[in-house]
Image: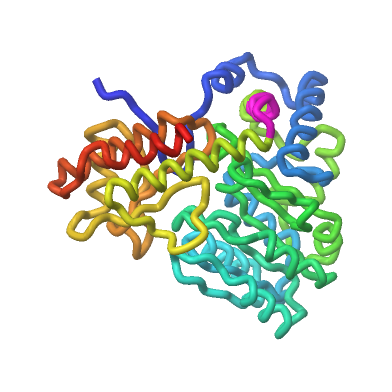
Amino acid sequence: MLKRYLLAPGPTPVPPEVLLAMARPMTHHRAPEFDKLFAEVRDGLKWLFQTKNNVLMLAASGTGGMEGSVSNFLSPGDKALTINGGKFGERWTKLCKTFGADVTEIKVEWGRAVNPQAVADALKKDPGIKAVYVQASETSTGVAHDVKALAEIVKPYGETILVVDAITALGVFDIKTDEWGIDVVITGSQKALMLPPGLAFVSVSDKAWQLAEKAKNTAFYFNFKKEHENQQKNQTAYTPAVSLIVGLQEVLKMMRAEGLEGVFGRQAMLAKAMREGVQGAGLTLFPKESPSDALTAIEAPEGVDGQAIYKNLRVQYGITAAGGQDHLKGKIFRLSHMGYMDRFDVIMGVAAVEMVLKGLGHPVKLGSGVAKAQEILMA
């Protein structure tokens, strides 16, 4: 028998309480009981996003939220600044070009965080830029960008918005949407929100809504204005992912019980333990700076194929992790510790990596990484 474990950076494990909630009989999305549920969830999302803004819920993956955050705010020919430090930063550039934006791209070496000064310089050079697009946590590299610093830079530009992909950040580390002045924050259900894939969430500021009023791109399904009008009345423009929203109600109860500080503290502890653990086993972290608390990206040792590590974790030990993307395929592997995770998920992950490396003939002292992780977890 091979027990299955999920340490991939999305989808992530779903708590039993949430699975049970989603197994309830189906509720019609125009029924009064759904209105009540939707109102409760909307209030909970404001708490989680730390905002007074209405947080839109879309039946889509996180990329749907990203696409809508381009099509609803930019007109063809509008200037956009994208931060490309990985696979998902690259996606911002592709989306902006798809909708006809005039794109300036700041390319960041994979494994490094953007220098906020580069963004400041770009805006100073061209204050006509309408939107700045960035990841809070670049999932492909395991790097966190300093969105607080970027918000301070963008805020003085009255007609420029900051759009943050927080798909592997929200619910992992502190993102003070309103206090920092982030105009658009996006996340998805299948990461730290501990749900199956299928929901995207987008917080939109008043400043961003003003830009949306002027935008000339057309969106039918991802029409934020239409959704905003409906969701303020606890309805959706189209059929929502009802069961996922029922599950979200349970997730928000769990997160409120732990408290934001508790959630962020736990995630930070698990991240530190994973990083210290794999380094204790003699491995090197891929991020050269600013590692994300959502996942740990690890360099494959010299002479060892990262894909073999990823494959053997799954085949031998039932652990689904993630490999590298694009030019990093075979060079790194990634382990998630966001969402429904605790101390022993980290211990298991580090132990399994040691065992896989030993099996591949790489010299590793079994238990060396586990001991380092345990020290952090017991501190």
**Is residue 258 in the magenta section?**
yes
Position of residue 337 in the picture relative to residue 319 (left or right) = right
Give the image quarter of residue 23: top right
Instruction: State whether the magenta stretch is mostly helix, strand or loop.
Output: helix
Please tell me whether residue 257 is drawn above or below residue 292 in the rendered image: above
As drawn, 67 above or below 41? below
Q: Considering depth in this image, is 344 or 207 the residue closer to the camera?
A: 344
* Residue sitting at the far front: 379
245 or 111: which is nearer to us? Answer: 111
In depth, the one of 268 and 245 nearer the eye is: 268
Locate residue 370 relative to residue 129 in the image: left or right. left
Residue displayed at 60% across by 36% down: 193
Query: How many numbered circles does the render carry?
Result: 0
Q: Is residue 242 visible?
A: no
What residue range appears in magenta? 251-259
Q: Quadrant of residue 36?
A: top right
Residue 335: x and y, percent?
A: 40, 44
Residue at the spot 70% in from the left edge and 28% down from the top edge:
256
In the rendered image, residue 223 lying in the magenta stretch gets the answer: no
